[in-house]
Image: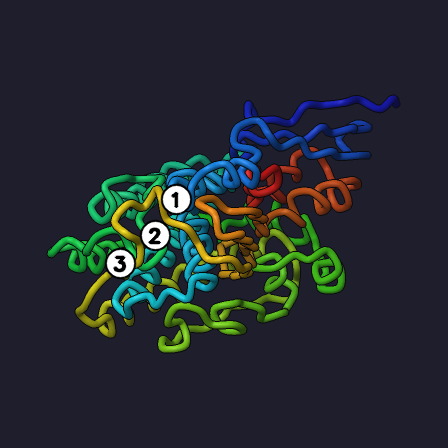
Amino acid sequence: MGEVKLFFGPNHPGMHGNFSVHLYVEGDTVVKAKPLPGFLHRGFEKLMERRTWFQNVALIPRICVPEPDINEVCYSMAIEKIAKIDVPERAQWIRMIVLELARIANHLWSFAGIGGPLGLYTGPFWGVADRDRILDIFEQLTGARIYHMYIIPGGVRKEMPSKIQDMISQTLDYIESRLPDYENLILRNRIVQTRLKGIALLDRESALTMGVTGIGLRATGVPYDLRKVDPYLYYNYVDFEVPTATEGDAYSRIKLKYLEIKQSIRIIRQVLEKMPEGPINTKFSDGNALRYRVPKGYAYVHVEATRGEYGYFVVSNGEDKPYRVTVRGASYPQGLYGIEKYLPGTRIEDVPIWLDTMGVCAPEIDR
């Protein structure tokens, strides 16, 4: 039997985003795999070096569309670190709410995404509809559903609306009430267990060697979560657990996403109780943000995205634009090296399972 080249791209219901993988197969078995990002958003690092510091706030959310706020907080924290800007306490708590809501939304999106390759189309219907409730909150809070541009250097762009906390609490109650349905639909589903258990395996040593973080690493038994290991914002003032597993397969990763939604709900409820009144940003420019200059210096900051460690290395030469920006995309290891190394030997139908449970986000790779 000869080797056949297949284009596994955005046309497939199991592909996540504008991403493509060239598969070389013999029968149903993958012999070689080559990832091809760059079908949508690309080249952000050089684009950022050609735009002013505040113009980049509108650009960077596109580096990962399902979880754009991670880019906003990393970029802002890097500028704040270089310029020694003190962010008001209330703004820090609000940032935590945004990040955890984005985490829940992204995990719901993953529940929806796993339905495509498995033929479980109730998953997409439920996941997308419930995720929309989170987007409703973002729309009320920021004026936008996807690209929020809400977290800015110095704090957040505007105060929370008067009734938004009730809206958040009611939405959390609803999502929490839906979790048993997702457990029955996905985690206890015999077909899902057959398709995911023992599939898309990644052991602890390989994950550490390759630089995989997040759920991909925690599924191998390593409790590495930056919110605990290197706390930022006020994560060290809230109680939550870091779920782990030991199997390192697709099923354990999708289960951890389910458990992390519970922890994010727990975190947000504590934030709503602890968050004080006060200012929501620091006025540090001369009134014209487009003329703002960051002092000379450099900084690396990192946060815990749903896919793992997400980082920004920013260098300023004192001008009105960044001198250099490098993004540590959390899905880079599993979305590039992982595809080339671990997809060969698997079956064609298991390729999208790797992409979904590992949370591959294409622009992070070709940034």
The correct choice, above or below, for 30 with respect to 354 in the image is above
Q: Are marks 1 and 2 in contact (CB under 8 Å)?
A: yes
- Element marked by disc 2: strand
Q: Position of residue 342 (x, y in %)?
A: 75, 46
Residue 19 appears in the rendering: yes
The outermost residue toward the left is 162
Q: Nearer the viewer, residue 8 or 81?
A: 81
Q: Nearer the viewer, residue 54 or 235?
A: 54
- Element marked by disc 1: helix
Mark 2 crowdedness (10 Å alpha carbons): few <14, some 14-19, many ≥20: many
Earlier in the chain: of badge 2 and badge 3, it is 2
In the picture of the structure, the residue carrying the numbered disc 3 is 283
Judge from the rendering whether residue 159 lies leftward or rightward of residue 91; answer left or right: left
Q: Foreground mark, 1 or 3?
A: 3
Q: Position of residue 44 (x, y in %)?
A: 53, 38
Separation of residues labelled 2 and 3 (CA atoms): 11 Å
Earlier in the chain: of badge 1 and badge 3, it is 1
**Looking at the picture, which amino acid does disc 2 mark?**
Ile
Judge from the rendering whether residue 22 lies leftward or rightward of residue 164; answer left or right: right
In the picture of the structure, the residue carrying the numbered disc 1 is 57
Mark 1 crowdedness (10 Å alpha carbons): few <14, some 14-19, many ≥20: many
The correct choice, above or below, for 272 with respect to 166 in the image is below
Image disc number at residue 152:
2
Q: Position of residue 136 (x, y in %)?
A: 24, 44
- Quadrant where the N terminus sits is top right
Earlier in the chain: of badge 1 and badge 2, it is 1
Q: At 68% from the left edge and 23% from the top edge, which residue is drawn?
A: 7
**Looking at the picture, which amino acid does disc 1 mark?**
Val
- Element marked by disc 3: loop
